[in-house]
Image (spheres, coloured by chain):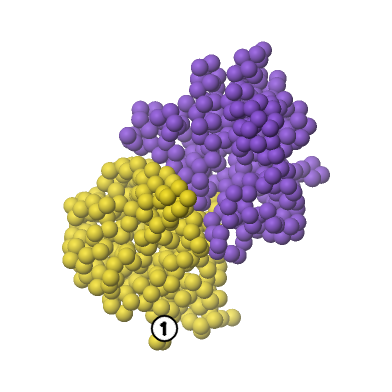
Chain colours: A purple, B yellow
Amino acid sequence: MPSNADKPQTTHVCYADSAWHGVAKVELNVQLARDTFRLRIVCPQIARRILPGQFVMVRLPGINDPLLGRPLALYDVIVDGGNPAAIDVVYLVVGKMTRLLARLKPGEMLELWGPLGNGFPPVQGGHLVMVAGGIGQTPFLALAKEHLGLQQYGDPPRVAPQAKKVTLCYGVRTADLLAGLDDFRRAGVEVFVSTDDGSLGHGGVVTDLIAPVVDSSPWPCCLVCCGPEPMLAAAAQIARQRHLPCLVSLESPMACGIGICFSCAVKIRQPSGGWDYRRSCVEGPVFRAEDVVFPTTG
Amino acid sequence: MPHLPELEVQLGRLRLANPIMAASGTFGYAREMAGMVDLRRLGAIVPKTITPLPRAGNPPPRTVETAAGMLNSIGLDNDGIEAFISNQLPYLASLGVPIVVSIAGKNYGEFVSMASRLDGLPGVTALELNISCPNVSGGVDFGADAQMCHRVVGGVRQACSLPVLAKLTPNVTDIAQIAAAAEQGGADAITVVNTCLGMAVDWRRRRPILGNVLGGLSGPAIKPIALRAVYQVARAVKVPVVGVGGIATIDDVMEFLVTGATAVQIGTANFYDPTVTMRLLDQLPDALAELGAASVAEVVGTLSV
């Protein structure tokens, strides 16, 4: 049952107070894998403020169909001459909007607003273990680079604790959907891959990869996860059994991204007991795993 | 140098500095928009509808995009009137713009007691009766029945000294008749329209897409329906009409004013164009000047048929 809203809340509302809204130029739109593209948008206003795990809403300017923006997580910030100049997002072609995005050419314009959401907090602990399913790897490149001391994000630039090691456990249906492996490896991330059909790496679900990594690590591990809900629920359970901190970035469908439509409701446990629907866009998309009521776990 | 057109409008006892309002359910409690919009410039803000008790709202998915529009079945997710008064109202009151509090009750008594609770509270400028939300059982009945509409508007008028707007549903046979009933009940203005009842289906899974099966259609797709409702209602009542439904551009605003709306509310456009209200305010003087009008009032209802 929903709890009384006057009582203390699990989450903190992160309003779009530093968000920029406008039209910006596409600089790059290249294919990374099957149906998967990396899009670069020249937008210093967002680039200098955005944190790993935050997102932008993107739409095609001047048209009514498709109508609503689509939430896309920050993949990386592109620095030019020492200044944050552009943001990269990675998207999977799944519907009307993403099919049109895939046709965009450098020089064409996109409408966007952001940065939005809470993003990842600086992650404490020696070994950062990132668990991604499907297109869920996209928020992790910037997080990894930040915790490996390769890049700073935010305004003023945020100082994150340095990780002893960063590992990516990345599962997809089939090998040709794996997108951005080189980017992660180049940053110094250890990568383990799983495929549902066994076409590459471990044949099975990505959560099979977690226990061997965390159980053999000499450092305290922290899990961050993004992907389908059953994957998040399974990863959260593995973390809970081992008393490891675990953050999840939810991919709830959104209409506005700024907290005004109440579409992206997710069940969040309340300190007073019970749960309440909270807005993933302004109270997430990153939540502590133990606060999320997953449909599969009840 | 020509004078700028006068933007002030009067909705019964409610005076607005300009006719651009933020519609209920599409602007949160305004605090969400503070980083993107200069809230003080708005003619009025209608915060998300409140109910007597907290409501969790409907299970997701709560919205789905459709051609040039969207369906929603949020289900009046809100923390209840007391949480609104303690957590949202102080901020809204600090803005210095008219706050039109949108209320929904399950029955006559709930509407009346909410009106009486809000009467006289700092920051509450007026009430908008949401007698038209398609997503809560009970709510739609008041806007679908002329007698019930008349009674609830009259009861709210007696229970408080606030200006009262009645927000009507387009999902009725004769909206002009309902509007006339609201006017007779004492409404200061009539807001038309709430969303159009609709549905989206995934045929491969043979399932409705929305968690609540049916939802309310909004966005540019319903603009012609809203414009038609403004036309019909403006001819049926003497009180001012507030137009809402798919308004996203200055041309849309002018179409509604000319057709008979004294003010307009911007709804779904806030979702996909969060700074739209500021752009419309920037563009309004020039559009009025294009008609040679010295004020908004001069163009309202000037449609020749």
Q: Residues within 10 Å of mark 1 (few under 14, many from 20)?
A: few
The quarter holding residue B100 reads: bottom left
Report the quarter where the N terminus of chain A lies. top left
Can residue A168 be spotted in the picture? no
Query: Could you tell me residue B270's position as x and y percent?
Result: 50, 58
Q: Position of residue A79 (x, y in %)?
A: 76, 43
Residue at numbered disc 1: B303
**Residue visible at 59% across and 23% down?**
A208
Pinpoint the chain carrying mark 1: B
In percent of the image, x 45 and y 53: which residue is there? B203
In the displayed structure, B77 sits above or below B234; it is above
Farthest-out residue, right: A81
- Residue lying at 28% horizontally and 70% vertically, measured from the top left: B173
Instruction: Determine the residue located farthest toward the bottom in the rendered image.
Output: B305
Q: In the displayed structure, does residue B177 sit left or right of residue A202? A: left
- Which residue is located at x 40 percent, y 57 percent? B199
Q: Position of residue A19 (x, y in %)?
A: 59, 49
- Helix, strand or loop under label 1: loop
Q: In this image, A100 relative to A261: left or right?
A: right
Res B86 quadrant in image: top left
- Quarter of the picture containing the C terminus of chain A is top left
Q: Which amino acid, mark 1?
A: Leu
